[in-house]
Image (tube, rainbow, N blue to C red):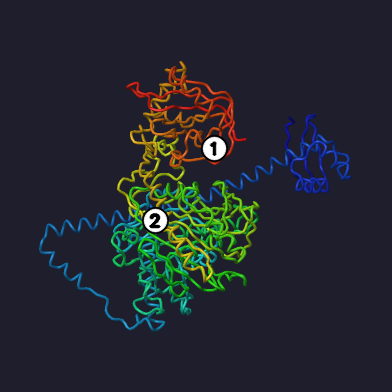
Amino acid sequence: MAAAVALRSGGMEKQSIDTGKYVRYTTEQVEALERLYGECPKPSSMRRQQLIRECPILANIEPKQIKVWFQNRRCREKQRKESCRLQALNRKLSAMNKLLMEENERLQKQVNQLVHENAIMRQQLQNVSLANDTSCESAMTNPQNPLRDDNNPAGLLSIAEEALAEFLAKATGTAVDWVQMPGMKPGPDSVGIVAISHSSCGVAARACGLVNLEAGKIAEIFKDKPSWFHDCRNHEVFTMFPTGNGGTIELVYMQMYAPTTLAPARDLWTLRYTTTLEDGSLVICEKSLSGGGPISTTSHQFVRAVMLPSGCLIRPCEGGGSIVHIVDHLDLEASSVPEVLRPLYESSNVVAQKMTVTALRHVKQIAQEVTGDVAYALGREPAILRSFSQRLHRGFNDAINGFNDDGWSLIETDGMDVVVATNTAKKFDNHAIPANAFVLTGGVLCAKASMLLQSVPPALLVRFLREHRSEWADYNLDAYSAASLKTGICSFPGWRPTKFSGSQTIMPLAHTIENEESLEVVRLEGEALTHGAILSGNIHLLQICYGIDDNSLGTCFQLVFAPIDKHFPDDVPLLASGFSVMPLDTKTNGIPSTHTLDLASSLGASSGNQSAGDHKSTDYHNSRSILTIAFQFPYEAHLQDSIAATARQYVRSIVLSVQRVSMALTQVRPGHNIGNKQLPGSPDAVTLAHWICRSYNHHLGMDLLRNDGGNEESLLKTLWHHQDAILCCSFEMQPVFTFANQAGLDMLETSLVALQDITLDKIFDEAGQKQLHSGLVKLMEQGYMYLPAGVCRSGMGRHVSFEQAIAWKVVREDNIAHCVALCFVNWSFL
């Protein structure tokens, strides 16, 4: 290829070609080539010749010269983009370095302060007489100051200035002993530096990071709490007035949702102070006021929480952008909830994930959208997709809390396990319902329950609920809700039977930075049966998954969804239902969410991709979490009792399904467990893998796997990732499958939990069953048999072809037959 060097001088461009001569381009020719480059940066040979014919000004230039020019132009463009990328990265690293240096300086001050305090305490211990002098310290109180009267602006300014000083001492000083939050390592690709406090009064968290937005825009976003704080139900500014120093003071009332049906919600009455410091930094600080605040008819549903000085410090950064410090310090009155739930209100980790880090992520997300660094599916605007997520969160939280002023009221129930409430209001999800909708004669009904889970990895549970919907969902009820919202006609679910394949297709729409939350559309495939005719019965759900990514902080996990039309408009009403799991022992980080309910969960600890210190702790022994379930259904007035009974029974069936899945998940441990021992006496995964491979070698005289002399755990890993479908079938009780590797589960379209529901005769047709049964005698005599190419069926009824199948007896160490193994070679769906 010709070496080319392009130079610009005096409006001319010089270019060398193979002959060693330079080609000079006029300014007009360069402008024409630039226009063509904008249309097609990499034209083909025919396209270059066409360009010369269509553009007379290029007529005296050879096609080869045009080719070299485009090569040089692409090279310059690539260099320019790389230079811009490196400059942006350098600015980001410089800002991060400044943050780390400031953090190091703060820590050094904290160390010096602790050393000084330690020296004083030693001196006091050596001189007992000094102990009497300490009583004067406790006697010091703030004198009554008329300027601190909450009813006049001067008093509020005094409170505001005090809150500002205390907030700055927390944000950049040593007022709080901050420690790095587990799982949050600072770096150029992280959200920022995140710290929590274990020793301060209440719960406190701090986050700081670089945001590519100007300070005023960040302040505007931060003040709009309902846009990013999912637990914010109401946020209202009652009074606002300017201060003499150019700042503003606001009196703010905020209501926060309760995370479960077992606790009351929280509200706050605070003073918010916005001002600019001498160095140009913008500050928004907030502090609770004693007494006062609005009193509503639903005040009995709230407990007044206390906000200690908190807020946001925004410092302009050289080269553009801002360095943001966010502090949240709260006293959530943990004594007002049952003792089992108090960890939710006493954990700084929970505050960090739900408030502090969420706020920083939100402003960074908007910054990326402004610069065009992210693109979303279906051509939707980022603001529209964010509104979908906010409305799903809000609808789910409204259903859990059931506030009276939203129109919710409890109905009689036959027990305490499931609570049923109705809402006859003509609006929900802040959107009006069409004129023919169900709310004119009925309303919305919600069945909800909370349950304590023991030794269950929350991320794994929510991931299973997402990926294996057929294990717990009733598709007829999904079809009922979807049809009611679309047509405004509510009929009892049993009147319109629907046949579903059980399969689902998940289509991603958007996700937040670090994949903390994903927004997706789910299509459930089915056929509606009407008067003997079969019509399309596909159901579409808008769904959010929160907290199940590997980078999640591990303090909140949610799966929330709502039925929609496949061409859903931006203002579609959303009737949210779903699950929320919150660990009560937040010191455990949980099993990485990439593990599913299968053998892969037992391979996580031994994976060669992680060092011993990199993977998260998976010790969930004796850990607890609280699961909250809420499902909403539309109804007509005359069907209220029927729908209420159906909804109550449905939620109870879901609870039973979750309990069954949880029992399997409690067995998920890194190491030797399959994940669920379906039959009594089943060996662990490593032992079974050893038996399978040893028996294969014994009967057929060859190795099933290539282990390269590794240990038994590496043998298990190789078996699990083998390209052919390998399954084990027990004949002791009935011919049921007891184990399958990943390819086997994919072929059967099932999971290890549901594997025991599939028997050997279900996957073969009549001819295949006869062929298999006729060869059983040979199998038992010589220990193995071959099955020719054929077709079998998956657990979903789909046909699967295979080139060959091998069956052999799996024997234990004592040479007693344990089960029969089958290997399907080169299988594929038809």
Counting from the top left corner in percent of width and height, residue 424 is at 50, 73
Single out the residue that lies furthest toward the top. Answer: 701
Q: Total of numbered circles in the picture? A: 2
- Inspect the image, locate mark 2, and give the three-letter code of the amino acid beneath it: Leu
- Inspect the image, locate mark 1, and give the three-letter code of the amino acid beneath it: Ser
793 relative to 30 in the view: left or right: left
Q: Which mark is residue 193?
A: none
Q: Residue 248 versus residue 803: which sits nearer the camera?
A: 803
N-terminal label among 2 and 1: 2
Badge 2, how many Cα within 10 Å: few under 14, some, many 20+? many
Q: Residue 580 versus residue 739: which sits nearer the camera?
A: 739
Counting from the top left corner in percent of width and height, residue 535 is at 65, 53
Residue 102 seen in the current view? no
Quarter location, residue 489 = bottom right
Badge 1, how many Cα within 10 Å: few under 14, some, many 20+? many
- The answer for how far apart the CA atoms under marks 2 and 1 are is 33 Å
Q: Quadrant of the N terminus?
A: top right
536 relative to 730 in the view: left or right: right
600 relative to 769 in the view: left or right: left
Counting from the top left corner in percent of width and height, residue 296 is at 41, 79
> Relative to residue 288, is residue 80 depicted above or below?
above
Q: Residue 248 versus residue 736: which sits nearer the camera?
A: 736
Residue identified by numbered label 1: 794
> Relative to residue 243, is residue 392 depicted above or below?
above
Q: Residue at x 59, y 47 (%)?
A: 85
Q: Residue at x 36, y 75 (%)?
A: 300
Counting from the top left corner in percent of width and height, residue 191 is at 47, 52
Residue identified by numbered label 2: 627
Disc 2 + disc 1, Cβ < 8 Å: no
Q: Residue 12 versus residue 33: which sits nearer the camera?
A: 33
Q: Residue at x 43, y 46 (%)?
A: 460
Circle 1 SS class: loop
